[in-house]
Amino acid sequence: MTRWRSLMLGAATFLVAHLIERAEWSSLFAGDTATPWFMNSFRAGAFTALLLSLSAGFTATRDVGETLVRGLNVGLGATAVMVVVLVVIGPGTLFPIAIAIGMAIVVTASVSGALAGAIVRGARHARPPHAPPS
């Protein structure tokens, strides 16, 4: 099922990550050695994955099935924007491989972030064990 809010959140998160990477590429990520793209630098990839994990974590519920759907939607929204950004900056000859690897990165980060959010949310709402009366 499509969760439009999660899909748009993933798209917006990837776009924000890319814009930050583009603005700060020379100072924070890879200098002037490569085109600003999240897979051209380990730091940029980790930054994008972290942002996607955090944003997907906010979509989590205590229902694991719903959390997985929302995490996948965040990842698919990020993938859609990733493809658009790749086309805009110039896809190169190996763009299908870049899309496949990029999709694996963003979907894995999104789903793991959503599951981590579900664990945190479940722990936050857990009740303390009932103590027998003394």
Image: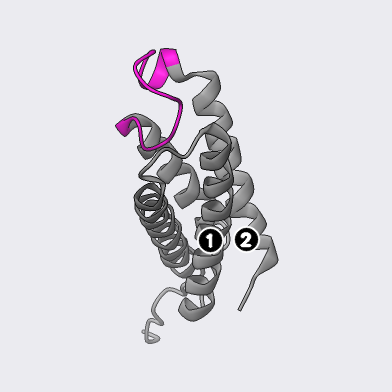
Quarter of the image for residue 131 reads bottom left
Q: Which mark is residue 97?
A: none
Placement of the N terminus among the 4 image quadrants = bottom right
> Which amino acid does the dot numbered 2 rest on?
Leu
Bounds of the magenta span? 26-42
Provide the residue designation for mark 2.
Answer: 7
Q: Is residue 30 magenta?
A: yes
Residue at (50%, 58%) from the top-left corner? Answer: 75
Residue nearest the observer in this picture, 25 or 82: 82
Q: Residue at x 52, y 57 (%)?
A: 56
Q: CA distance from mark 1 to mark 2?
A: 7 Å
Q: Amino acid at mark 1?
A: Leu
Numbered badge on residue 76:
1
Instruction: Give the x, y percent position of residue 111.
Output: 43, 63
Viewer-side residue, 42 vs 53: 42
Task: Based on the picture, tell me whether residue 12 belongs to the magenta stretch.
Answer: no
Secondary structure character of the magenta stretch overall: loop
Specify which label sits upstream in the sequence, 1 or 2: 2
Give the residue displayed 45% in from the left and 40% down from the top.
Answer: 48
- The secondary element bearing badge 1 is classed as helix
Q: Where residue 38 sits in the image (x, y, percent)?
A: 42, 36
The quarter of the picture where the C terminus appears is: bottom left
**Contact, CB < 8 Å: mark 1 with mark 2?**
yes
Q: Nearer the viewer, residue 118 or 19?
A: 19
- Residue 90 vertical position relative to residue 95 in the rendered view, above or below: above
Above or below residue 26? Residue 91 is below
| Residue 105 coordinates in the image, percent (x, y) | 37, 52
Number of on-image labels? 2
Horizontally, is 59 left or right of 29 in the view? right
